[in-house]
Amino acid sequence: MNLQALIETAQAMVADGKGLLAMDESPGTCNRRFEALGIAPSAEMRRAYRELLLSTPELGSCISGVILCDETFGQATAEGTTFVQLARDAGLLVGIKVDTGAKALALRSGEKVTEGLDGLRERLLAYVETGASFAKWRAVIAVNAVDGGHLPSAACIAANAQALARYAALCQEAGLVPIIEPEVLMTGTHTLAHCQAVTEALLREVFEALTLQGVALEALILKPNMVIAGLAAPTQNTADEVADATLQCLRRVVPAAVPGIAFLSGGQSGELASSRLNALHLRPRAPWPLSFSFARALQHPALDIWAGQDANRAAAQKALMHRARCNRVALRGEYSAAMEAQ
Ligand code: 13P
């Protein structure tokens, strides 16, 4: 492992006020989003959509890197340029989602643990050889009880934290920067305070596990949820309240050695995600660069516009760039709703 090279990659992922484009939906998730819009759920349509995203002109002016899933990692443009090459030619770092999904946690109804450690060392080496610079692993933690109990359990948090830490250690050993994504789900009716308590407990355990496994904190990126009330909660908070709770939570548990934090969007609209990101940058400077690693909040307008039609390609790319620019501006604290009308 070349620690210095890993540190430089991690820093580059959050440098220059840019963020990451997560486009690593598994074929199943991508198909579900396609079907909702009447797009054929085929490998060819997934390929065409990913080509559209990756060939968006000037994407690299706002985006430092892209996260791909295994299928996309092995695909190519209609002309035969591999997507890895296309991204690198556009000045983008290439990342790969390496977990194999969140599965039911044994004896814990309604809770999940993310799998994918078996054979991971060999898979990582193959990704490195093909041009990956970083990797991603997502743990999903539900806040609301599905069966009247009090989720998440300590068992669920511990199992996911340990898996994230073992993944991160394998990544660094292989020469990849691990993105650590412990996601407290936004679905539910919970309050902002409840989300903050769960996020804090989860992150505390994740950093303990990372330390136990010997992971270099200087060579990873944390990808957390923002601290918000559940999407179905009767009381929704202002962007300022979200920013204050999020920063208080992160300051309590994320070591200053971490080179960057890139938020997931988690089902927030593109506009809300941008305005909350903006509010985070209107507060006293945090110990880490605060960036974004959005999937839905960057892609959704573009996917809606494309709708599987080649004729809509340029308009969809324009919509993607609009969201990317809004978020880049938010990283300077200069985003406003007026930008949406432009
Ligand atoms: P969202 O921004 O849509 O939450 O996705 C981020 C991601 O990478 C999910 O794993």
Image: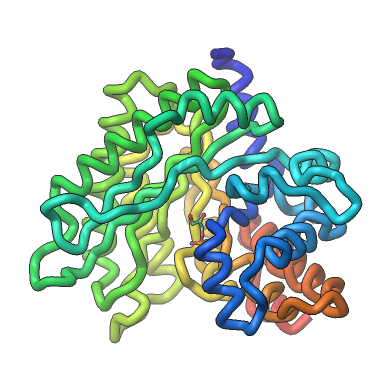
State the residue at coordinates (74%, 84%): 341
Q: Quadrant of the N terminus?
A: top right
State the residue at coordinates (24%, 73%): 190
Q: Answer whether residue 203 is visible to the viewer in this image.
A: yes
Along the viewing direction, whichever of 83 and 278 lies nearer the viewer: 83
Which residue extends farthest top? 2
Q: Is residue 46 above or below residue 191?
A: above
Q: Is residue 224 above or below residue 1?
A: below
Q: Quadrant of the C terminus?
A: bottom right
* Image coords of residue 240 (percent x, y): 44, 68
> How many numbered callouts?
0
State the residue at coordinates (33%, 29%): 210
Q: Quadrant of residue 194?
A: bottom left
In screen coordinates, is 315 left or right of 94? right
* Image coords of residue 191 (percent x, y): 25, 72
In screen coordinates, is 300 left or right of 89? left
Q: Answer whether residue 257 is visible to the viewer in this image.
A: no
Along the viewing direction, whichever of 182 and 272 lies nearer the viewer: 182
Along the viewing direction, whichever of 328 and 332 lies nearer the viewer: 328
Q: Quadrant of residue 235?
A: bottom left
Q: Is residue 245 above or below residue 256?
A: below
Which residue extends farthest left? 149
